[in-house]
Amino acid sequence: MAVPKRKVSKQRKHKRRTHFKLSAPNLVACKQCHALKLPHVVCKECGYYDGKEVIKVEEGK
């Protein structure tokens, strides 16, 4: 089996993991209610997608 000859230092390990991080979600404004939502997903506020009502949203939550 392949075994490391030397210990990998903390600095080397952290340099390798610099790109391993979370990114913020890309949000867009809904065309109906102008609330922020994920692209290509039904709006949770009004229930519209691509100008059509897809789900019924209850009022007064």
Image: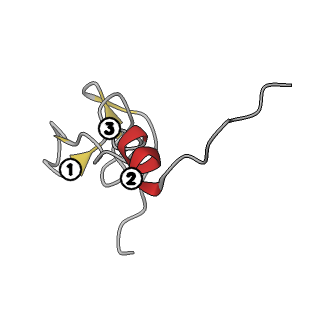
Amino acid tagged 3: Tyr
Q: Name the mark on residue 11.
A: 2
Specify the farthest residue to the front: 5
Would you place residue 41 above or below residue 8 in this image?
above
Q: Earlier in the sequence, mark 2 or mark 1?
A: 2
Foreground label between 2 and 3: 2
From the image, tell me which residue sits under label 1: 36
- Name the one closer to the observer, 26 or 8: 8
- Name the one closer to the observer, 38 or 42: 38
From the image, tell me which residue sits under label 3: 48
Asked which secondary structure carries label 2, the reply is: helix
Foreground label between 2 and 1: 2
Question: In the picture provided, is 43 more to the left or to the right than 17?
Answer: left
Q: Name the mark on residue 10.
A: none
Residue 19: x percent and y percent? 34, 38
How many numbered callouts?
3
